[in-house]
Image: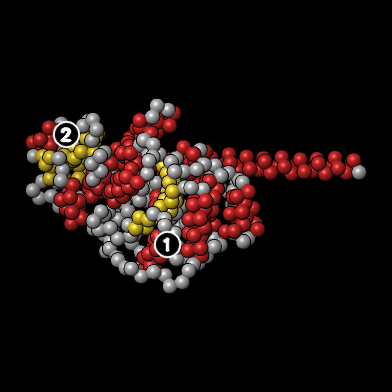
Amino acid sequence: MHIKNNLLLKCLLIIAVLLIAAYLTSSQLLSQNNYAQYRYESFWNDPDQYDVWFMGSSHSYYSVYPMKLYESCGITSYDIATPSSTLPMTYWTLMNALEAGTPEVVFVDVYHIDMEETLVSDLKKIHNSFDAMPLTATKINAIRDLVSDSDLRRELYFPAFRRNGKYESLTRADLPEHFKLNKGAKLDTDIDPVKPKQSSEELHDGTTGTLYLKKIINECESRNIDLVITAFPFNGDDIKLHGLNTGISIAEDYGVPTLDMSYCTDLIDYRYEFSQDGHLNYSGSVKMTEFIGDYLTENYELEDHRKTDDSIRKKWNQDLVRYKNYLIGKLKTEKKLREHLLMCSDKNAFELKIYISDNADYDSVTGMILEDLAPEQFLTYKQASAYSGRHFDCDVMTVISDADSSEIVDISFFDNGKRVNGN
């Protein structure tokens, strides 16, 4: 009997070692190669350092820029929203995150509240959401709730061992640097005009999404966490709009604060502040972030970490320098004049001086942006040549300065709306 017990213990020990090795191997591979790990690992390493969490679908991470929030308000935040995240996925992301930290405020975007499904059919979506999470009992429960196939469940427990093949061999160049620099948010300079939609109609019946929204509300209430239900500007069908109305209505019934920005023509210019996939682009997101920052400052007593003398302030200030350098690099490489000018709309970051020839040719959208930009100075050809240090032959030349230091960070030339070298 004693021998059998020893043999059983040895077998259990071997199994435990193999499981630990598999998980550690999985984590190592993820840190090297996996998109989700690269995007979210900063959050999962220390969720408690972020006072505000943004959760939900891509409409969240396209709409709010955490580094801008820190720069203007000193608020530390992270956007752990994931592409096409349903309310069940958002609920389980929240439950896993709450095991490691407790935020002051949580924003939950309810764009996909109309969806009936609990089970996730697109495995890529759940990998994007869950691969960076540590393996815990809560993560196991989440996977069991969201995925029915036992083989797929095991793949999500240990993502390094996917049955559908090896990990792609990704290099740092393949991964969007701004995800780390901007704490999970995504920057887009595409432009696609949108017609604003407005409706007061709601969904006629409850959905799985409404059920999980109520679970989120109850969970935050039980933990004394301030929750804000949000509906960001979007370009979608009527069902999505009815769903957003329903989510806002449910929150109001529970006495939960809401920000319904699904129709906000007083803040967002629908002619050029959306991208081709119906999300806010850079200019719209900067405005939305300023709005969120004002809302947080006025309604919550959050610490201004710019004024604290601690490691968080030091780290965020270092990240802010890298983030600003990233923005400058992107500004310099935008190939279209209108996207270059779109970035200049962030007047807290950049100051614009511009030369435009009498026969300059650019599209109507570029004209709208220029009109709203109200550049600091329109240059004559002589003034522009003095800035560039040479004569040039093109329609438009821009001189961009850092808004804080007034140091010139870029001089660019454009012809027929496209970047040229100016010769």
Residue at 25% in and 48% down: 342
- Report the residue that reaches farthest toward the bottom: 204
Q: Quick check: 385 left or right of 184?
A: left
Q: Secondary structure at mark 1?
A: helix
Which marked residue is nearer to the observer: mark 2 or mark 1? 1
Q: Secondary structure at mark 2?
A: helix
Residue 339, labelled with which disc? none
Q: Quick check: 422 left or right of 58?
A: left
Asked if residue 70 is positioned above or below residue 143 in the image, the reply reads above
For the residue pair 82 and 354, the one nearer the viewer reads as 82
What x and y, as percent, mark residue 124?
Answer: 52, 55
Earlier along the polypeptide chain: callout 2 or callout 1?
1
Amino acid at the residue labelled 1: Asp
What x and y, as percent, mark residue 45?
Answer: 52, 38
Check whether the beta carbons of the residues at disc 2 and disc 1 lie within 8 A of each other.
Answer: no
Residue 388, labelled with which disc? 2
The residue under label 1 is 253
What x and y, as percent, mark residue 347?
Answer: 23, 41
For the residue pair 349 and 38, the one nearer the viewer reads as 349
Residue at 32% in and 45% down: 298
For the residue pair 219 and 116, the one nearer the viewer reads as 219
